[in-house]
Amino acid sequence: MIRVESEEIKATAREEGVDLVGVASAYCVETTANRRGPQSILPEARSAVVFAKRMLTGSIESPSNQVVTSQNLALYQELDRISYVIGCFLEERGYQAATVPSYNPVEMTLETKGFVGAVSLRHVAQAAGLGVLGKNNLLITPQLGPRLRLGAVVTTAPLDPDRPLSEDLCGDCKACVAACPADSLSDPGRTHMGRCVRQIFPYGLNRLITYLTESLDRPREEIKQSFLNPNFWNLYQSLQVGLHYGCHACINACPAGSSKPE
């Protein structure tokens, strides 16, 4: 077993193109009914390496859902690739490593309803000092604001953790609350997930269930016609390429880390 230092892992992550990277203790997040900590996927874990890549503002502010969705899916693929590279780096040195899914799959149970990931990446990132949780309940960083996506690797390597940030990046600002079209941030710091998910994923599970239920109650000829409906085509496409994104309002409204020209 070869001793691995935190800075060595961070350097490897930066070489792979991450914008932010930090290390947290594997004990940083307690596993609960609605949240999973690092040790839930690797019981002997000692540390978690968490990193972020920036979102392109031109893409997430685009009126084209195809552009928005394509960027997010590309980011998730890149984060998963980087996770695997870091995992290999650690296991080649004698430690176990488990990659955290950056996107899918999620835990689909009656209790979680798909809202719970394998590990809560934003809480691990907060513990690793990358940023703080804002009024939009997302990770907000000084450098990028909330315009990022996260990936992580959980490992048995005993790495030195970073310190969490102590600054308040929101202050009195409630731009995200005002911008939310679904009123899902009416209690700042808490997200009404049902409202949010219906807005973010216009062709998600709820839409699919509704569409199929309504279609199956129709006469045969009407069922055939329903397959010629563009809503069905978009549902079909989302099953092939991944969920379509329909909203980044709270992210786009956030002034933190904004690099827009004056």
Image: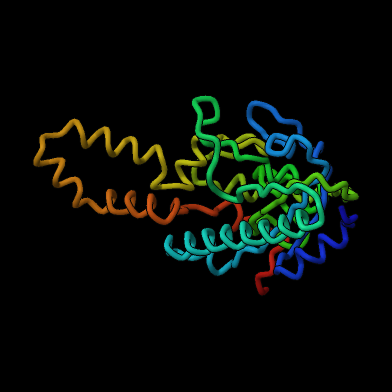
Viewport quadrant of the C terminus: bottom right
- The percent coordinates of residue 250 (x first, y second) are 59, 51
Residue at the spot 41% in from the left edge and 39% down from the top edge = 205
Res. 219 image quadrant:
top left
- The percent coordinates of residue 46 (x first, y second) are 83, 41
- The percent coordinates of residue 257 (x first, y second) are 72, 62
Instruction: Judge from the rendering whether residue 88 lies leftward or rightward of residue 199; answer left or right.
Output: right
Judge whether residue 166 can be spotted in this image.
no
Indicate how the structure is coloured in the image. rainbow
Residue at the spot 78% in from the left edge and 37% down from the top edge = 44
Front in this rendered view, residue 29 or 181: 29
Front in this rendered view, residue 40 or 67: 40
Judge whether residue 111 can be spotted in this image.
yes
- The percent coordinates of residue 237 (x first, y second) are 35, 55
Res. 115 image quadrant:
top right
Residue at the spot 49% in from the left edge and 25% down from the top edge = 110
Residue at the spot 63% in from the left edge and 34% down from the top edge = 187
Residue sticking out furthest to the bottom: 261
Using the image, determine if residue 127 lies above or below residue 31: below
How many marks overall? 0
Using the image, determine if residue 255 lies above or below residue 202: below
Instruction: Judge from the rendering whether residue 43 lies leftward or rightward of residue 166; answer left or right.
Output: left
